[in-house]
């Protein structure tokens, strides 16, 4: 059925019940003579119109269709029956508040984080990790208990080189929840960590350990870190340079370029943006 609200009669009752195989059908038994029905109708219509893909409001005028009301065993008005896959799953008699109705429907409606996840999944399929990252982060803020969101965010973080964040997210996963997806992301993280420790980086780290005040070595190492997406390590080195000399080499430009390359909503970017602001002002 294309419409979110339909009037039900004996002629189309079977078609409406068939629609419950795809969405939740709210059978509203009402009468124009009932004040309670007049109060309830606008609430139901408003809710259903917000979720046309998930809900169908099937209105039964009991003055015109008494036989249909009798078949459903309706004893008082207003009465609302919630039908899913041809069977009653919930309902109520009398007038309910809008919040109480929404609470009853919550199990059958998409959660805010699900809409974000649906968008993120499309971006992940296209390997647009920078686009998916902020959506997943927002979804996790809405539902911090959902393990699969943590894993998808960790996966995006690994792909963007945010290895410490990915490691922290994986560290929150309980043993009982360490499924195949967890093992895949963990393996991806371990490979990324190995790839991020190149011979060039090891040589520069050793040189810097011998000359810890050498800003030229720090800048070179920061460049190597960024080349393997170790953004936080690179920013930390560059910040140390800028704290001593704001105009040293290309450090300020590199610092700003790294910030610009980080995904929207990234906590590392926010932290180092604040640090630079404090330094400048």
Image: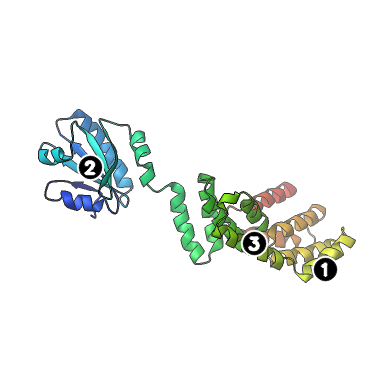
Between discs 3 and 1, the one toward the N terminus: 3
Instruction: Using the image, tell me which numbered label, if any, was put on residue 189.
Output: 3
Residue located 73% across and 58% down the image:
233
Between discs 2 and 1, the one toward the N terminus: 2
Q: Position of residue 23 (x, y in %)?
A: 30, 51
Q: Position of residue 184 (x, y in %)?
A: 58, 62
- Secondary structure beneath disc 2? strand
Residue located 24% across and 37% down the image:
80
Q: Residues within 10 Å of mark 3 (few under 14, many from 20)?
A: many
Q: Residues within 10 Å of mark 1 (few under 14, many from 20)?
A: few
For residue 28, which quarter of the picture? top left
For discs 3 and 1, the disc positioned in front in the rendered view = 3
Instruction: Using the image, tell me which numbered label, if any, was put on residue 27.
Output: 2
Report the front residue among 132 and 281: 132
Image coloring type: rainbow
> Residue at the front extreme?
176
Instruction: Using the image, tell me which numbered label, if any, was put on residue 203.
Output: 1
Report the front residue among 246 and 232: 232
Q: Position of residue 84 (x, y in %)?
A: 29, 47
Q: What distance separates the C-alpha of mark 3 from that of mark 1?
A: 23 Å
């Amino acid at each position: 059925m294309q419409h979110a609200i339909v009037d039900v009669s004996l002629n189309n009752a079977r078609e409406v019940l068939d629609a419950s195989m795809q969405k939740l059908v709210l059978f509203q038994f009402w009468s124009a003579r009932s004040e309670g029905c007049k109060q309830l109708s606008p609430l139901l219509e408003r809710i259903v119109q917000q979720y046309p893909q998930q809900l169908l409001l099937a209105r039964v005028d009991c003055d015109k269709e008494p036989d249909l009301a009798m078949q459903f065993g309706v004893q008082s008005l207003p009465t609302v029956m919630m039908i899913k896959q041809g069977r009653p799953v919930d309902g109520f008699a009398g007038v309910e508040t809008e919040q109480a109705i929404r609470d009853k429907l919550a199990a059958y409606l998409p959660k805010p984080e699900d809409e974000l996840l649906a968008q993120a999944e499309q971006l992940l399929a296209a390997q647009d990790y920078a686009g998916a990252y902020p959506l997943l982060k927002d979804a996790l803020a809405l539902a911090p208990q959902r393990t699969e969101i943590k894993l998808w965010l960790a996966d995006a973080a690994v792909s963007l080189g945010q290895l410490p964040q990915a490691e922290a997210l994986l560290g929150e996963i309980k043993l009982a929840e360490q499924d195949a997806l967890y093992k895949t992301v963990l393996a991806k993280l371990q490979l990324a960590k190995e790839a991020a420790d190149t011979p060039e980086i090891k040589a520069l780290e050793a040189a810097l350990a011998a000359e810890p005040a050498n800003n030229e070595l720090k800048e070179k190492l920061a460049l190597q870190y960024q080349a393997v997406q170790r953004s936080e390590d690179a920013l930390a080195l560059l910040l140390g340079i800028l704290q001593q000399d704001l105009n040293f080499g290309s450090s300020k430009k590199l610092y700003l370029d790294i910030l610009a390359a980080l995904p929207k909503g990234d906590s590392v970017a926010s932290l180092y943006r604040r640090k630079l602001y404090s330094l400048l002002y």
